[in-house]
Amino acid sequence: MGLFGNLFSSKKVKDSVLAWDMHNHILFGIDDGSKTLESSLDMARQFTDLGYARVVATPHIMGDYYPNTRAIISEKADILNSALKENHIHLKVDFAAEYYMDEVFLDKVNANEELLTFHGKHLLMETSFMNKPMFFNKLVFDLKTKGYIPVFAHPERYVYHHQAYGEIEQLMHLGVKLQINLLSLLGYYSPQVKKLAHWMVKNGYYHFLGTDAHSTEHLKLTHEVFRSKIFESIDFSKVENAAVK
């Protein structure tokens, strides 16, 4: 059963294997995640039911579509944390961002703008689901040169990877850390996404596991992920947001 076999004999402990979530959209009213403070509180309750003590909110920063800033994100996090205390919900919400790799992001990097990170200098980024930007490798190099640690959000979801699994290995060689969405393991997005996510798990190509939760629906389904055989096969000594190392 593996390193964590004994832990999985208790559902309460099993649901606590991941101590903190590093990819979610719990902050309300600033992207395609939570729409209201009340829905954010409902998501927080679901996180605690899953055993999480802390989450890092990662709202989108995407050109003119989601033009979020540190000030906007920080204000929403402060409001949510205050509401969590008032409602006696024991969850700490920190924040970073999920950067879309577009020209706006490229300009931020080139201008040496201070970027929002988590777990030290880890920086979460995503691309179009259909195409990888031509400047991807150069941008990764520049980020690393500036001291950032690039973390690629849900590589299993990108269509351009589904016929080119070797691209995942190239990401590892580039020094990019990989984050798998928990619901990808369940097949929530598509059979192709599930197939690639399982392949990544079996080959050890992962560093973080994130909910990428946009709603309570995503978090309710996560309980099923925690009970799955593929989840139990994960080597949690490789997972940087695991509760037990």
Image: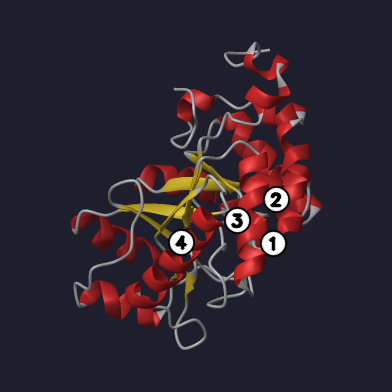
In three-dimensional space, the C-alpha distance between marks 3 and 1, rounded to whole angstroms, equals 9 Å
Residue visible at 44% across and 65% down? 77
Q: Which residue is mark 1?
A: 215
> Which of these two is toward me, 104 or 26?
26
Q: Kindly indicate whether the residue at mark 1 contacts the one at mark 2 (C-beta within 8 angstroms).
A: yes
> Which of these two is toward me, 225 or 198?
225
Q: Is residue 134 visible?
A: no
Identified by mark 2, the residue type is Leu
Per the rendering, the mark at residue 219 is: 2
Identified by mark 4, the residue type is Ser
Q: Which residue is mark 4?
A: 82
Identified by mark 1, the residue type is Ser
**Between disc 4 and disc 3, whose residue precedes?**
4
Which mark is nearer the camera, 2 or 4? 4
Label 2 crowding class (10 Å Cα cut-off): few <14, some 14-19, many 20+? many
Q: Which residue is mark 3?
A: 212
Image side of residue 173 versus residue 163, left or right: left
